[in-house]
Amino acid sequence: MFVLGIESSCDETGVALVEAGESGLPRLAAHALHSQIAMHQAYGGVVPELASRDHIRRVLPLAQAVFAEAGRKLADVDVVAYTRGPGLAGALLVGAGVACALGAALGKPVLGVHHLEGHLLSPFLSADAPEFPFVALLVSGGHTQLMRVDGVGRYELLGETIDDAAGEAFDKSAKLMGLPYPGGPWLAKLAEGGDAAAFKLPRPLLHSGDLDFSFAGLKTAVLTQAKKLGSELEARKADLAASTQAAIVEVLLKKSLGAIEQTGLNRLVVAGGVGANRALREQLNAACAKRGVRVHYPELHLCTDNGAMIAMAAAMRLQAGMQSPTERYAFDVKPRWPLASLTEASPLA
Ligand code: KG4
Ligand code: ZN
């Protein structure tokens, strides 16, 4: 079975082809990606209308590239999967519209995928795939959640951010330091040459005793510190970046360890764009090694948004009998869509 996956929830257009048997892990045949980062950089953030228009331009050429690389053709596709949400409504509609048009034209069923489930299952695309059950730390630009994952579609929310996401904390702090969009990778790079102990920044909810996060106050503290530095900011930027990163990483680390302790599980999966952060990986690896906990990540290039994770999540849902694709092509999208609600959905609905 070949599953074509289309991702268009935000500022990356991703297309991928995954091959799945009746059992065993699905395998990535080919994937292609176009990042709109350069286009949005001039505005300091994603401009939804421009994102939608660019997805329209990119999606079919990317699909052609995928078929060429895989040595397959459109007629080989058995199911067309697309990101149904959460994300930008207009951007989602492009992927949903193209997927349903392809499905209708080919006479093949379509399946709408939850973007975060894509991130969550993306480590199954790597050679060292995890096994269920595990704790998942989902850290993207829009979400910060800890989940208990017992299988495909069996997700229990353990804790989440009550305001900004970890990615937002990176991006907003980076913006205050004059770094380009999206600031996460830029701030991380700058932090490599800085002193993480230079500035005392808050670690919100660190000792709250639960698994929730809060990052809005950190951004305010970074702004206050930047203002205090004034003309000195430029010279101390690396130190401020390193201190900011240290605060975010410490909170993510402590809460992840808390989730491991609370669930008694010995496997951690880290997914979403912030999962590419080196300091986070180093600290999680060290702390988990000490506790005999295995940590799994998606391959570095599959940490941020991509089509492979959407095709993979669809293939795994189909294999698990969690969902049937549909030949009704009246699509919708869900700009807001809690991941834990997938667990409540009746199987095969
Ligand atoms: O998962 P993702 O690609 O998109 C969403 O679904 O939101 O995550 C994007 C986020 C951005 O906030 C970006 O700054 C952050 O991931 N990010 C990083 C790094 N690479 C990407 N944050 C910190 N360090 C990185 N190396
Ligand atoms: Zn994402």
Image (cartoon, rainbow, N blue to C red):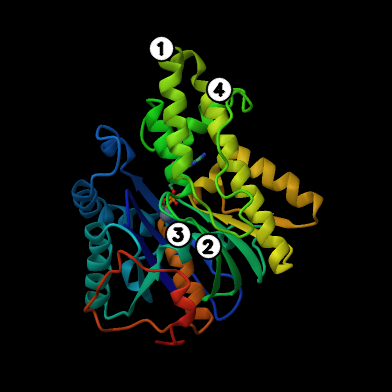
Q: CA distance from mark 2 to mark 1?
A: 43 Å
Q: Earlier in the sequence, mark 1 or mark 4?
A: 1
Amino acid of disc 3? Ala
Residue position marked by numbered label 1 in the rendering = 231
- Write down the quadrant of residue 7 in the picture: bottom left
Q: CA distance from mark 2 to mark 3?
A: 12 Å
**3 vs 4, front mark:** 4
Amino acid of disc 1? Ser
**3 vs 1, front mark:** 1
- Badge 1 crowding class, 10 Å Cα cut-off, few under 14, some 14 to 19, many 20 or more, is few
Q: Earlier in the sequence, mark 2 or mark 3?
A: 2
Amino acid of disc 2? Leu
Quarter holding ligand 2: bottom left
Q: CA distance from mark 2 to mark 4?
A: 32 Å
**2 vs 1, front mark:** 1
116 vs 106, left or right, is right
Residue position marked by numbered label 2 in the rendering = 120
Q: CA distance from mark 3 to mark 1?
A: 45 Å
Q: Earlier in the sequence, mark 2 or mark 4?
A: 2
Q: Nearer the viewer, residue 115 or 174?
A: 174
Amino acid of disc 4? Asp
Q: CA distance from mark 3 to mark 4?
A: 37 Å
Q: Is residue 205 at least partly visible in the picture? A: yes
**Residue shown at the point (57%, 26%) measured from the top left:** 199
Residue position marked by numbered label 3 in the rendering = 308
- Badge 3 crowding class, 10 Å Cα cut-off, few under 14, some 14 to 19, many 20 or more, is many
Q: Earlier in the sequence, mark 3 or mark 4?
A: 4
Q: Nearer the viewer, residue 44 or 26?
A: 44
Answer above or below: position of 250 versus 302. above
Residue position marked by numbered label 4 in the rendering = 239
Q: Earlier in the sequence, mark 2 or mark 1?
A: 2
Q: Quadrant of the C terminus?
A: bottom left
